[in-house]
């Protein structure tokens, strides 16, 4: 009975450990495409790594081109880059207006516009080159992601985003309540097991020694 109680306790501790120490995973999500004048805007560019691809060298180049007008192909401008281990703010119209907003593991390779203007409407291109470091060879892979940015004078409510956020919080509340119920259930089950063990031990100690030696003999008052 004591062993069963210890198993329940170990299971409960393990459950709490997993909940509190679980680490977030990389999720490739699209960037927001609506910006507001005068506000900062993150241009999201995510390139997740597999476990066997963690040793790599990364180069990131960001470009900007305005929307096409009058069937004239727009000119693409190199505005920012990340060269292996450090970001570089390039000369041009975006110098001093951009900041590196990526992560240390270089799975998030985003940048942010510090102060959005109407002239920022256009297509931003995230060009990523990775060179993987293995024992026998060093393959390289490149990806290109485009963000078509629209700048507005003021923020507009997105009903779909609001609904998704509400559903996320409801799911979080449900999971939290479920975890609490499981903890209470495990605690009550452990307490009940301890009480049964104590009752059994008490009843056994209350039986006279003659009755223990001869279980079939009647107990006289």
Image: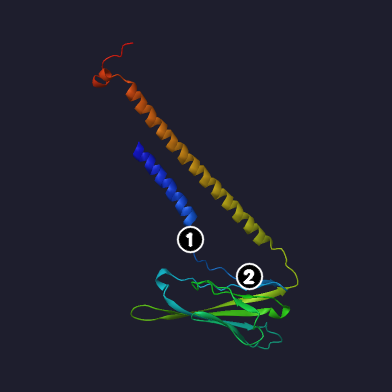
What is the x, y in percent for residue 113?
65, 76
Estimate the spatial distance between the alpha carbons at disc 1 and disc 2, rounded to whole Å: 25 Å
Q: Give the residue at x 55% y 46%.
A: 177
- Residue 32 - label: 2
What is the x, y in percent for residue 5?
38, 39
How many numbered callouts? 2
Q: Give the residue at x 47% y 37%.
A: 188
Q: Give the residue at x 64% y 55%.
A: 166
Looking at the image, can residue 215 be seen? no
| Horizontal side, residue 205 vs residue 161: left or right | left
| Horizontal side, residue 45 vs residue 140: left or right | right
Question: Front-most of 172 and 106?
Answer: 106
Crowd band around label 1 with a 10 angstrom C-alpha radius: few (<14), some (14–19), many (20+): few
Q: Which residue is mark 1?
A: 23
Q: Are marks 1 and 2 in contact (CB under 8 Å)?
A: no
User: Between disc 1 and disc 2, whose residue precedes?
Assistant: 1
């Amino acid at each position: 009975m004591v062993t069963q109680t210890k198993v329940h306790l170990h299971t409960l501790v393990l459950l709490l450990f997993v909940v509190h120490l679980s680490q977030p995973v990389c999720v490739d999500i699209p960037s927001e495409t609506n910006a507001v004048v005068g506000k900062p805007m993150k241009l999201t560019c995510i390139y997740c790594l597999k476990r066997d691809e963690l040793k790599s060298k990364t180069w990131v180049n960001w470009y900007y081109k305005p929307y096409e007008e009058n069937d004239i192909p727009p000119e693409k401008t190199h505005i920012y880059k990340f060269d292996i281990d450090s970001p570089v703010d390039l000369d041009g119209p975006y110098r001093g207006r951009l900041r590196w907003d990526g992560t240390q593991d270089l799975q998030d390779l985003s940048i942010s516009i510090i102060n959005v203007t109407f002239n920022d409407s256009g297509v931003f291109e995230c060009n990523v080159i990775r060179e993987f470091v293995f024992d026998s060879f060093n393959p390289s892979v490149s990806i290109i992601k485009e963000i078509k940015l629209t700048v507005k004078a003021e923020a507009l409510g997105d009903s779909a985003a609001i609904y998704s956020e509400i559903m996320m919080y409801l799911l979080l509340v449900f999971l939290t309540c479920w975890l609490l119920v499981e903890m209470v259930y495990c605690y009550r089950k452990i307490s009940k097991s301890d009480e049964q063990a104590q009752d059994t031990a008490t009843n056994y100690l209350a039986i006279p020694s003659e009755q223990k030696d001869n279980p079939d003999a009647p107990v006289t008052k």
